[in-house]
Structure formats: C-alpha cells, structure tokens
Image (spheres, grey):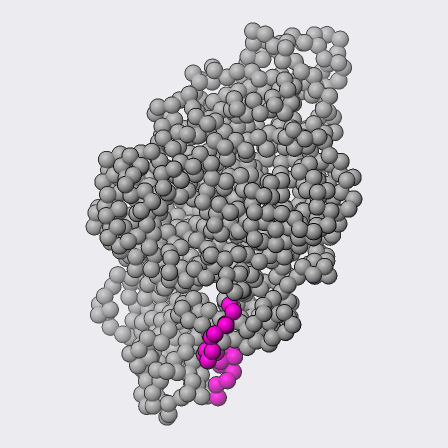
Amino acid sequence: MKNYIFPFLWMRGEEESILRNEIAKIYECGIRAICVEARPHDDFCGPGWWHDMDIVLDEAKRRDMKIWILDDKHFPTGYANGLIEKQYPERKKQYIACTTCDVFGGSHPLTLNVGRMLKPTIGFWEIGNPVDYEERANNTLLSAVALRFHEGSVFCEDAVDLTEYCKDGTAAFQLPEGQWRIHVIYKTRTDGGNPAYINMIDAASAHTQIEGVYEEHFRHYGAEFGKTIAGFFSDEPQFGNISDQCFDTRLGKEKMPLPWSDELAEMLTQRYGAGWRALLPFLFVDTLEHKAQPQMRYDYMDCISKLYAKNFSRPIGQWCHDHGVEYIGHVVEDNSVHSRLGLGAAHWFRAMEGQDMAGIDIIGGQYVFGAPVQERKGMVKADGEFFHYALGKLGASAGHLDPKKQGRTMCELFGAYGWGFGVRNMKYLLDHLLSRGINHLVPHAFSMAEYPDFDCPPHFYARGNNPEFPYFAHLMKYANRMCHQLNGGTHVASVAVLYDGELDWCGERMPMQKVCRALTENQIEFDIVPLDMLRDLPAYNGCVKYDTLEINGVAFGALLVPQAEYIPQGLLDFANSAPDFPVVFVEGQPKGVVRDEGGKPGDADQLSKTSVVKLEELAAYLADHGMKQILVEPAFSQLSVYHYRKEGVLFLLVNESVNQRFSGTVTLPAAGKLVCYDGFADTYEAVQTELLDGAVRVSLDLEPGESILLTEGKGMESLPQHPFASKLLAQCRKQTDLSNNWQVKCLRAKDREESCAFETVAQLQPISDTQPAFSGRILYRKTFELEEVPSHGYLRAEQVYEVMSVRVNGKEAGIRLTPPYQVDVGAYLQKGTNTLEIEVATTPARDQLNYPMPPFDFSHEALEPTGMFGKVELFYS
C-alpha cells in the first residue's frame, strides 16, 4: 500500500538522538513520509540546518521514508529565508494606497499639497509608530482624481482627472459646484504589509523564493531529489498587503493598500489604454452607478490573480518538475478570503495552478463535530457553514477536475485545536474530510520541543508525554488504508457549483457554501467548478455533450450559480454556447455582466433561457430533474455521502450528528451487492442489501459519529456480518452488570506499569473528580463468572474519556477510539472465571494544569472528565 500521510516534523535544532527517535515514532504509526518544517530553525539553510537535515535524510533512507520540505524559515511562505531584507531591498512588495481630501467646488480655484498626501493619514494614537522614512521618500504619485459625493461614502462615477495639474508636489485646479472628494493614489513600498516578504505579482521578487530556499536545498541534496526527497510544501503564501489578520479584505476596505507591480500596470494599460489611472479610485470606494466600479474591480482582481499564478505558483511548480520533485501546499481559505486580498491569494483555483496536489487546511477549531453552522470564536471568527459544507469540497474539486493533480487532494489537519483535541475528535475530523474527497493528509504536528510545547498543540508524541500516542498510531493506519481506498479513481457527481470567487470581486453574492449546504444535507453529490475551466474545457479533458458537462471524467447534469450582483461575460458565453445544458441560478439572476479581458460587455437579459430556483427548493428541483441519485429514508440531513468509482463503486457515509442515530435505508446507484470495508481491521464484511432496478438499498444503523465505507462485493462470499452496534445488543438474551468493584490504577504517560499498585473502587466515577490535574493511562481490572461459554458477547461502556482498549483473559479483544464504546469479546470468554482488563487513555489537556500557563491562548475550552464511568455491561447469548 502506498503512503498518503506526511506529518509536519518541527525542527528547531534538536539533538541527534531526539531527531532519530521522533522519526522512529512517526514510523511506528505506519507513516512512511514526513514534511520537515523549521519552527523556526535559527540556522535555516545554514550549517546547523544542513547538519540536522543530514540526520533526517539518513534516518529516512534507513527506513525507506520520503521527505517533503516546508519551503521557508517560518510560516507563512514568502519570507524567502530573509533574502528580501538581506539582499534584495529593490524586490520589496509594492502597493498602491489612497489618501483623500474633501473640497467644495465653485467659482474659485483650489491648491492641494499633493506631495504631503503621498503617505497615509494616522490617528493620534499612532504617532511614534516606526516608519521607514527613507523608503517612504520614494513614494510616487500615480493619479489624483476627484469624485462627486452622492451620499455618505457613496460617490458618483463622473470622475475628474486632476493628475495633469499635479506639478512639483502641488495641484492647482477648479471643480464644478458641489461636494467632491479628491483621491490621491500613490505607489509605495512602506505603507502596506510585511516589507520582508516577496511581491507575488512581480516576477523577480517572486523568484526570490526559489533562490532563497529551493536552489539552496538542491545545491546540498540534488542527488536525493526525486528519491528520498519527494518535494516542497508552501504554507499559506498570501498577498499580505495588510498586517491585520482579517477576512473582509475585498476591494473597498477602508485604508487597505493594494498589491501592485509594473506588470500589473501593463496589463491594465492593455485593457483600458491610458485611462486606467483615472479609474483607480473605484478600487477604494463605492459608487452610485455601479458601472465602471464593478468592471474595474473585476479587472484588477482578474489581473493580480493571474499574475500570482504566473509569477509565483507556476514557476515554483515548473522548477520542481525540472528538478524531479513535486510541489504541494495550501493557501488561506477561511471565510471567503480564498478569493480576496490580505491573507488570501485572490483566486483559490489559480493559486493552486502550479501545485501537483490540491491543498487545504482545517486547523484551530475550524471544523467542530456536531456544530456545522455555528460561528467559531478562537483566534478569529470563523464561518462554520463554510468549513463544514464548502472547504473540503473546494479542495477535493480541484483534485478531481484538474488533470495535473492526478485525483489528489491534501489537507493539513489537527493543529492548533488544543491539547483537549484527542484521537476521538481527530477521527471525527478525519472522516469528515474523507467524506468530502480528501485523500492525502499532513497531520500538524510532531514537535520535538520540551514538553509541554504551547505552540499550536496537540502534539502527537510530545516526547512521550501524550498518553494517546499508541491510539494515534492506530488512527493513522486506518487513515492510510482509507486514503488508499479513495485514490486512483474518479469522483461521481450529479451537479456542479460555480466557484464564487469572481462573483465576490464585483459585488454582493450568495456565498457558495449556502448552495453546498443544501446539496450536502440532501445527499446530492457535487464539485465546485471555477469559470476558468468552463472557458477552456479542452485543457481539463472537458466538453459539453448535449445536457451533460464533463470535466476530467466527472459528469454533471447542471451548473448551479449562487445569486450575485454581477457575473463575468465568460459565464454568459458558456451558457449561450451550450443551450441544452442546464444553468441554474440559485435565488436570482444577476443584474449585470462584466466583460472579460478583450471581450465586449454582455447583457444579463441574454440569460432568459436559464432557470432560477429558490435555495429552499433546490434539492426538490434537482430530484424532479433526475439529479438526485442517492435516497435516504428517513431523511437525515447530517448523513454525508461521498460517491467514488474505481474498479467498482464506493460510497463513504458518515453520520455527522453529535446526538442522533441514523437507522434506516440508503438507496445507492450500484449494479450489484455491496459490502463494507473495515479500515481498522483491513477486512470486508457483509451488509444487508436489496437489489433494485439499477440500484441497491442498504440497511444501515449508524451511531453519532460513525462512518461506513461500502464497495462492490463481486467475488466476496461468506463474509461475516458488519457489526452495527445497537443491533448486536438487541440480539443478545442476557446481560451482566459489571459497573461495580473494579481495581483501578492511574499511570502518567511515561510511568512504568509497576510504578504503582491497583486500588479497589466500589463504584466507577470520573478520575478527574479526585485527580483534576491527571492525564495518562487508567487501567481497570476485574473478574466475573460465566456459567457457560456464550456464542456471542459484547462489552459496552457507557462513558469513556476518551479512548480504550480491552483485554479478556489475557488476549487483545479490541480498541475503540469513539463512541459507542462497544467491543466484541465473545471469542475470548470462557466458562467460569473471566478476567477483564480495560485501558483508558486521556488527552494531555488536564496535565497542563501542572505547568505554568502559556503566555497566550488562541481559544478557551472546558475540560472533559477522565476515565470510565457509568454503566459497564456484558451482553451475551
């Protein structure tokens, strides 16, 4: 089986023995690759780094493991190992910024000190903040344009270009009567984000990333490229035009400077001629007419997103291919910033162009099991609806549809959730991602720092201090097997959802996650499709055949377009070129069309042949038109389904409810019987099926959080029945209460088992009631009598925090990472005296009470109880 997992290995300059031991622990998890990350390493790309990398390479080669390299000294990618600040100040980021002056026009001339306006205005509280005055002296004027006030902060588009009046730092002019705001647009390298980072839309500046990191590693380890070294990983490269960590970075955000380069100026000249300078204020302000403004905003974002791909993403990808390795990573996707500036890269699909896998991340509480639509509050506010219904699908869609990705989508996951995020919650998050189509994983992280490392826990081994590490290894082996099942095939979808990036550039729009939610809750499979693919279908192995759109082997029965004020001309052209293919606008048609590069303005009236459907009626509409292939009875909105095709069909179903069991049937489009694949045991099991005309009805009973992978069972006969937990118990005629009189022993993660003795307890209770700061392994032991050997037997524990393993009469009976905590023990029971041993492992969360508080918190969480308590019963017959 191939390896699909490559966790971050954080390197800070540790001793050789620690490096080798950590890699050995990763290997114990069944993982055969790592992604080394300086976190930071003080001597990155220096002698100390090469010394440590020599050790890592030697250990990886000895174990036949692959190495990926995170491509900078510290997060995020774009620092280029400091070359901008140390060697290339002329390659600093460039921006355009806007300052303003309000005036009244009339019969008298006015004079404006334009030279003084080539810097931002500040508040009194900002006096004294550090400024690079030497560099600021190089700020230069681009344009000065007067816009007439309409009302509030809205302006009219009858602009007056005052640039020609600006001479020797002043401008003398006369304006018509009325109230005006003069916008002075200037170029700067100081009045924006981090000056030590590269300019993504300048070819020379962006190449600094290759020069500072990639070429240095090739110089030292070129012989291992394409062998032990698999490739490079970019972590959240971004425009970074502001320092704030925020997501409302659409054009028009107050006081936000905008990315700039000479090449961008050339592109705007090609689209507008010399008149583009007079249109620059529309990037900063809203207008009444909404004619020139949405067009200029579309053109600006279209240009910079193409330049990001041209100058940053694609050149790195090409460099990697030329040197025998691959290029992967992800950008910031959160809360629609995937199509915005600041933390974003302007257009998620274009940002992925140079990469060999599609990539996303889900960290820091972004996905919360059982809370799909709640707002998250941690480091930043987070839109639960986006993370639950859209993000995984966004990543997987590029993997499915872009031939360069070869069906592969990577997700960085688990990091910054906190020490309380244990293997149970990791399993929930993992299954969620698998059900969206994610099939490569970068767990975050293996940290070798002294425990406890407060940098974005959880840390999986934590120098031996994480009690759940053996269970994490168990989970990773499951994860790799599941990823193997979901690689090498083709996604099966019913409809396509238009990527909303361009819609967000121009005006207000319904976020695509609204449509994604309606589809997911009704088990209608989909991919998110960018307009670029529709513009150039042959490049993506695509075409339209009558009423079907095909892209890279995935067929769609309709294109769903979230409601938007404006759409690009390219979407109108696509709809007109394929009159038999359904284009469905959700909630309403646009009020306008913005022209594409070199195109002519379109007319929204040409969309008369398209359909409009209300969001709440969308699922029923698609079902009526034959685009709902999966039927769930009774309806269950939190049952997620992923439909995949390899040699046969596969269906992954996940109950994402935190408290509701699904008991019913699912009718699936399959030609023959289906069987269940157990990713933990690597075995197949039978399920109850009913063959219908072109479909199979499967009876399922999924507890909250449970998942099941169904696949075609050709040639698989006499399989054991899949053990749906509640049904197994219902078949048992007897039960014995084992809740009382246990021997209990508490061991910290690194304690030897003989370090303390068992204590007898009459009634089980949370260990945290008496030891609130304890984290570790809790051993439970007791004996019980059976008058005869049962044919079936199941142990069920009511409350476990949070993972457990069970031994019966000295033999391993099973491991449970999530509820229900039920284990088949029938094969190990005997007549007479039976010895039952249960180990419960906790997260390291309560152990943090034994250490000084970290200097910061990203979020706050309640501590769960620890241990096993409530009813413990044996069901048998």
Residue found at x 60% / y 73%? 697
Q: Is 728 a magenta residue?
A: yes
Residue found at x 43% / y 80%? 794
Quadrant assignment, res 32: bottom left
Whole-percent x and y of residue 594? 69, 33
Residue found at x 71% / y 30%? 600
Residue found at x 47% / y 18%? 136
Q: Nearer the viewer, residue 173 or 331?
A: 331
Whole-percent x and y of residue 721? 48, 78
Quadrant assignment, res 620: bottom right
Q: Is 354 a magenta residue?
A: no
Magenta residues: mostly which secondary structure? loop
Position of 302 relative to 707 (above/below): above
Q: Is residue 368 among the parts visible in the rendering?
A: no
Total marks placed = 0
Q: Is residue 861 among the parts visible in the rendering?
A: yes
Q: Nearer the viewer, residue 222 or 170?
A: 222
Whole-percent x and y of residue 254? 59, 30
Q: Is residue 815 left or right of residue 27?
A: right
Position of 727 relative to 424 (above/below): below
Classify the position of the C terminus by image quarter: bottom left
Whole-percent x and y of residue 97? 55, 23
Q: Nearer the viewer, residue 814 or 862?
A: 814
Classify the position of the N terminus by image quarter: bottom left
**Span highlighted in magenta in the image:** 711-733
